[in-house]
Amino acid sequence: MTDASPAPGTRGRPRADETVSAAFEGAPLEAPAGASVAAALISTGRTSWRDSREGAPRGLFCGIGVCFDCIVEIDGESGQRACMVPLRDGMDVRRDRGARGSDGPGDDRDPGAAPDGAKAAGDGAGAAGDAAEDGRSGE
Ligand code: FES
């Protein structure tokens, strides 16, 4: 008799041998089930998928949902963190052009007013980066 129950600790998790198929800017995007959108994009060789307001390339930075550098538009909804969203079959992933064309959810807010104490979208360098850009020295 064969035991059809899942292996211990695997219930509800995607099978490692399953692949999901989506699209990025209309091009095929595939990844193992359970991989994040960012992981899928990285696996295609991309290191950036949007530009900052200044035109600098942005992609995966923190990888844990804090910096917002990785934002994309998913199925028409902008401001999605690619590192936090699992790739799903049929997903339509696009560059996030944000409210003003580039920097995503932080564009319309005070840079110091990011939720959860996180820096708003931008360079991902935090207060030290802000100070350096402003010519300050750790004020
Ligand atoms: S890389 Fe996704 S939020 Fe930082």
Image: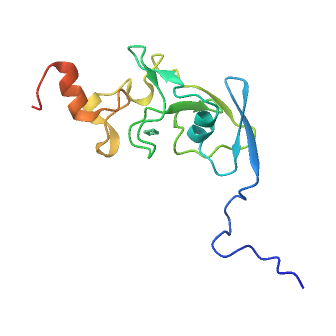
Seen in the picture, residue 20 relative to 29 is either above or below; the reply is below
Furthest-top residue in view?
A: 54
Q: Residue at x 54, y 25 (%)?
A: 49
51 left or right of 33? left
Horizontal and vertical percent for residue 27? 72, 25
Q: Quadrant of residue 3?
A: bottom right
Q: Residue at x 52, y 28 (%)?
A: 47
Q: Nearer the viewer, residue 112 or 47?
A: 47
Q: Quadrant of residue 74?
A: top right
Q: Residue at x 47, y 35 (%)?
A: 60
Furthest-right residue in view?
A: 1
18 left or right of 79? right
> Does any portion of residue 78 appear in the rendered image?
no
Horizontal and vertical percent for residue 129? 25, 28
Q: How is the image coloured?
A: rainbow
Number of disc labels: 0
Furthest-bottom residue in view?
A: 1
> Does any portion of residue 58 appear in the rendered image?
yes
Horizontal and vertical percent for residue 138? 12, 32
Q: Residue at x 90, y 85 (%)?
A: 1
Q: Nearer the viewer, residue 7 or 115?
A: 7
Horizontal and vertical percent for residue 91? 70, 37
Image quarter where ligand 1 lies: top left
Q: Quadrant of residue 112?
A: top left
Q: Quadrant of the C terminus?
A: top left
30 left or right of 120? right
